[in-house]
Structure formats: structure tokens, C-alpha cells
């Protein structure tokens, strides 16, 4: 088992976890709650001056852990694939501007073609943006998504596939983001996390829980302890694999978004210390 | 690629596919449509005299392909596990009475315990009912379910796990049901189907499609051709693995249940001949 978490020093919260808040509200409230890590969803950067945003983080001693999200490379339409490249290059610029060391890639899938074809296009897309990522000092984390998203959100659905892809591309700037929500069911998870760490490819660790029953494909994630994922066990594997980064709380939840977000942040801290 | 299906001789329809119909309506309408295979969901057997039901099938030259469903073995509560055994024994009686050679097992899961523990209880449950299944001449088909059901419906989520379990139990009366809906995303699917056939464990083949996007966890399945699954490719693997049984159309769909079911049955036949 994992050692118990006794303080908030490794807690990072995704801005989308507290979706009702804008960027300033996230930073000020996280800071007031004693949280030092933040992952920025790009929606909160829209219409923001990035120099001001960087100053906001610095003024609050907030460490930007990553930018979510790049990716969505595959399409049967070349013009859409090209647009995706442009959008990923923009994400790299944004990450560099706000000091984010990592971009999380939701790789994408197009149900009009095979998963194999989508995977080829994902690889091509990552290779295409890699020079700019390197030049900007920004790493790319392939996030395998739950197989229930294989039709439209990601053709990379297991740690094994993410490891394969990262190892094929074989760059210090390409690795993997482990999210318990997407991967908890996989009986190869432990060995693939070890493989990932051994290859220095373990770039990020995301936590939440799987509600039983789950009622929505996107916005019914649970807070750690709400559901059936053994989060401490998976954290122990990630740590054994050498990961020393933040534990990122990434929860999309209509239920929690409807709460008072200050009270929700206290629940998150509590769940982090007791069920993560 | 699979050879094209040119007639309905291998078409089986699950009674739940045409949920608005009772047992008699299913049998009469399938028969009138030229369909000879039927899989009986146990809800339509409630309050039925099974001798009458058997006569209904015989009078319409309807071949009962399987009974759906047994299973749901795991629970942290022993009393619930015992009730599940009783229910599975009843399913075996029902299958024997109506001449069904196979019971499909939706194995179950209890989110309050680990997947490993649920898998142990599934194995125990199958071993417990196996003598009665053998005595009745009824085979048990383990159906791996999509990982999105791992929290509450099945701790068996891949063909590899189903193959492992069937091979561990090692009985002519225990095998696997392949359902494209649950398994299409798995890049080990082809090799695991071959393994299954090689071990004479391939007992059933279910078809439908994965809608993009999918909006409901249970009742938004597509008709073959509606979604992103390459059904003919998977059928070709199943046939290459030696399977000679029916192609069973199992679709839970609020959308199609709202249609005129006679017209829907024509759509099913069309999708069967052109997209399966």
C-alpha cells in the first residue's frame, strides 16, 4: 500500500475540477486553501493576456503542473488534421508562456476510420509538433483514455498502447499521463506503470473515482472515495515506478459543479488526505 | 474480410432486441420475417408455462440459440452470492425446458470489493453450478463485458480474461460469448478469438454497433452499420476460429424500441445482410 498522504504539498487541482471559477478565482481560492499545484485547462486562458496569467501564478506561488489539453490529431479529413496541428502548436506556446512543463494529450479518434489508422495519425501528429515542443521546453504526455471513448476521443485506451507509442517515438519530450479513471479496470496496469517508470516516461498522475453506477459518459466522475477505484493502490504503483510529481485532482462532475466551490475544495482536500 | 452474408439462415435475434414484444409476438414475428434463431431473455419467460413455450418454438421451427442471462455471482454479501446460485440453477432449468443449449453469463461485479475478488467469486459460482449444467446438457458462456461495466456488471472485461477463466475451469460445458459491442476496442481481440476457437471455447457471437457519440450506458446500442465497429472483420475472425453458430443480434436501444417493431425487424434484416 501507499504511504498515507499527510500534507497538501503534492496536491494539484485541475481548473476544470472547479469549472464555475475563472482563472483568477481558481488561483486565489486554491492558494487560500493551501494548494500549490494547478493544471490549467485552456478554456480559462481564452481572452487572457498570458503575461498577466503568468504573473498571477507567480504572485500566488502557484506551480503550473500542466496544460490540458492538446491532441485530437486523427480525422479522415486532412484539413481537420492540419487544424489540429495548429491548435497543438498554440497549446505549446501557451504552455511555454505560463511556465507549464507538460501538455496533456487527449489523442483523439475518428470513428469513420479504424483505430489503427487513428493511432497512425496520432503518432504522425505528435512527431509533427515535437520540434516546437522541444524548442519550447514543453513535454507531451500521452493520456490513455477509457475504452468507452475509443469511438470519438482517443484511440489510445490502455497503458500498454501509450507505452508502446511513447517508446516508438523515443524522445525525452514524449511520455505518458496515468489517470486512474481511465485505467483502473486493466489487469495489466501495475506492470505497465512499472514499464512506464522504467523508461522515464511517467509524466503525470491524475486521480478521481469511478461512481457505481456511473450515469454520464463525461460529467459523472467521483471524488476519491466515492466509487470503486483503489486509488491508494494505484498511487503506490506510480510512486514505486519512480514518479515524484503532483497528484492531480481532475473531476468532471455536474453534481460537484453545482455545489458551493469553496466547500467543494474542502471536500477535495479531505478526500485527498484520506482516500488518495 | 468475411464472406458476405447472403441469407438469413444464421440470423438469431434476442428477444430483448424487440423489447416491446412478448414471447409469442417475438416468435410469430421472427418466424414471419424468415428468422429461425432466437435467444430468449428470461424476462419473457416470467409467468410462462415452459412446456407451452417449448411448443411455441417447435410449432414455428424456431431454434432457441441461448438463454440470457445467468451470472451476477459476486457480492460482498454471502446471502446475495447464494441467491445468485439459486437464480443460475433456475436459469439452467429454464434452458433445459425450452431446449436452449447455452446460457450466457453476465458475470457480475461488486464495486465494494476488488476486481480480483469478484473474479474469484465468479469462478466459484460457475464451478458451483457446473454439475447441474452438465446434467441438464446446458453450456455456460462467459461473456466479457466492456470495461465501462467493471464497477457493477462484470469483472470479466476482455477476451483474455474470459479465455483464462474458461481454460482454468476446463470443462466442455464452459466457454465464451463474443460480443462486438464489448470487445471491439481491444487490440488483442483477433488473437484472443483465435485462442478461444482453438480451445473449442467459442460458444456464441453477438452483433450490434457502437454509436458515435454514445449517450447512454445501457440503451444506446446501434444497429450494425450505425456506428464505428467493423463487424464484418470481427465476424471473419470468429469464423476463422471455427465458429459455425448463429450471428445473434442483441441491441438495447430506446430509439429502436420506440419504432414500429415490424419495420425495425426489416431494418435488422437489412443491416444483417449488408453490414454484418
Image (tube, coloured by chain):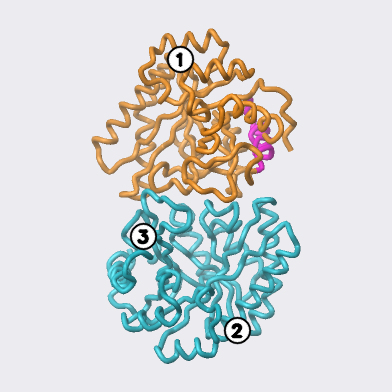
Chain colours: A orange, B cyan
- Image position of B39 (left or right of B83): left
Foreground tag (1 vs 3): 3
Mark closer to the observer (3, 2): 3
* Mark 1 vs 2: CB contact within 8 A: no
Front residue (pair A80, B255): B255
Query: Which quadrant of the rendered structure holds the N terminus of chain B?
Result: bottom left
Q: Is residue A248 above or below residue B276?
A: above
Q: Which disc, if any, is residue B203?
A: none
Sort mark 3 into few (<14), some (14-19) or many (20+) by Cα contacts within 10 Å.
Answer: few
Q: Which residues are magenta?
A: A230-246
- Work out which quarter of the rendered image holds the C terminus of chain B and state it: bottom left
Task: Measuring from the top left, give residue B66's x and y in whole percent.
Answer: 50, 77
Residue that appears at 46% across and 21% down: A22
* Closer to us: A174 or A258: A258
Towards the viewer: A137 or A251: A251
Tag 1's secondary structure? helix
Q: Find disc 2 in the rendering and name its residue.
A: B137
Disc 1 chain ID: A
Labels 3 and 2 in the same subunit = yes
- Distance of mark 1 from mark 3, alpha carbons? 47 Å
Q: Residue at the spot x=52%, y=34% of the render?
A: A258
The residue that label 1 is drawn on is A98
Location of residue B9 in the rendering, given as x and y in whole percent from the top left corner? 35, 80
Give the percent coordinates (x, y) of residue B262. 31, 74
Mark identifier at residue B255? 3
> Marks 1 and 2, how far apart in space?
68 Å
Which residue is depicted at the point 39% across and 23% down?
Answer: A91
Q: At numbered mark 2, what does the secondary structure look like: helix, strand or loop?
A: loop
Q: Residues within 10 Å of mark 2 (few under 14, many from 20)?
A: some
Amino acid at each position: 500500500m501507499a504511504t498515507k498522504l499527510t500534507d497538501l504539498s503534492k496536491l494539484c487541482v485541475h481548473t476544470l475540477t472547479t469549472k464555475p471559477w475563472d482563472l483568477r478565482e481558481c488561483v486565489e481560492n486554491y492558494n487560500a486553501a493551501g494548494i500549490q499545484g494547478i493544471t490549467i485547462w485552456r478554456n480559462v486562458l481564452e481572452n487572457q493576456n498570458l503575461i498577466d496569467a503568468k504573473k498571477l501564478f507567480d504572485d500566488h506561488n502557484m506551480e503550473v503542473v500542466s496544460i490540458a489539453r492538446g491532441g485530437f490529431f486523427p480525422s479522415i479529413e486532412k484539413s481537420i488534421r492540419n487544424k489540429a496541428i495548429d491548435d497543438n502548436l498554440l497549446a505549446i506556446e501557451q504552455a511555454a508562456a505560463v511556465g507549464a512543463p507538460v501538455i496533456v494529450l487527449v489523442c483523439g479518434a475518428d470513428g469513420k476510420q479504424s483505430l489503427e489508422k487513428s493511432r497512425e495519425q496520432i503518432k504522425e501528429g505528435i512527431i509533427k509538433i515535437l520540434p516546437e515542443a522541444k524548442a519550447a521546453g514543453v513535454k507531451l504526455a500521452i493520456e490513455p483514455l477509457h475504452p468507452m471513448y475509443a469511438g470519438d476521443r482517443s484511440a489510445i485506451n490502455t497503458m500498454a498502447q501509450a507505452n508502446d507509442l511513447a517508446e516508438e517515438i523515443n524522445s525525452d519530450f514524449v511520455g505518458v499521463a496515468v489517470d486512474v479513471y481511465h485505467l483502473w479496470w486493466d489487469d495489466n496496469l501495475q506492470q505497465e506503470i512499472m514499464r512506464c517508470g522504467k523508461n522515464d516516461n511517467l509524466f503525470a498522475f491524475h486521480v478521481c473515482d469511478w461512481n457505481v453506477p456511473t450515469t454520464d459518459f463525461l460529467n459523472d466522475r467521483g471524488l476519491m472515495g466515492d466509487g470503486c477505484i483503489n486509488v491508494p493502490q494505484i498511487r503506490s504503483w506510480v510512486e514505486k515506478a519512480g514518479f515524484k510529481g503532483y497528484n492531480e485532482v481532475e473531476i468532471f462532475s455536474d453534481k460537484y459543479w453545482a455545489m458551493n466551490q469553496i466547500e467543494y475544495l474542502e471536500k477535495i482536500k479531505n478526500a485527498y488526505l484520506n482516500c488518495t
